[in-house]
Amino acid sequence: MAWLILFVAGLLEVVWAVALKQSKGLSEPGYLIIAIVSMLFSLGLLAMALRTLPLSVGYAVWTGIGVLGAAVVGIIWLGEGLGWMKALALLLLASGILLLKFSH
């Protein structure tokens, strides 16, 4: 159950990062509210997951999901470029997340 909670927390990290981007420097209140609420829920779920998962694994996986998810959203929906070096970096991030998951 902790892994599912951690995964949802990571997805909410993506939500707040994208909402923060869409807030245009905190000038769009609707997106700012979405960012703050999703941030709070993400941190709360992370705290719940860390009750049973080791910090070294849980925090790294949570952050990794956020980084990977935000990058994918940026590429697919926000029109950011994807060169071979960025693709390799994202593949390495995904590999690291999986290795951490299976290390516990």
Image (cartoon, rainbow, N blue to C red):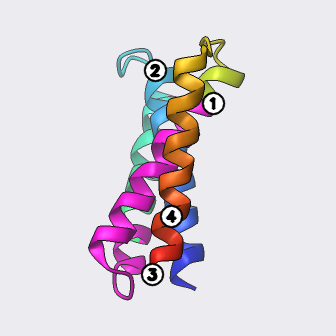
**Residue nearer the viewer, 30 or 45:** 45
Distance (Cα) linking label 1 and label 2:
19 Å
Q: Which residue position is annotated with label 1?
A: 73
The local secondary structure at tag 3 comes to: loop
| Residue for point 71% across, 23% down | 76
Q: Nearer the viewer, mark 1 or mark 2?
A: 1
The local secondary structure at tag 4 comes to: helix
Query: Does the segment drawn in magenta span residue 90?
Result: no
Q: Quadrant of the C terminus?
A: bottom left
Give the extent of the magenta segment: 45-72
Q: Nearer the viewer, mark 1 or mark 3?
A: 3
Distance (Cα) linking label 3 and label 4:
9 Å
Query: Is label 3 in contact with label 4 (beta carbons under 8 Å)?
Result: no
Mark 1 and mark 2 lie on one chain; the one further toward the N terminus is 2
Amino acid of disc 2:
Glu
Q: Which residue position is annotated with label 3?
A: 104
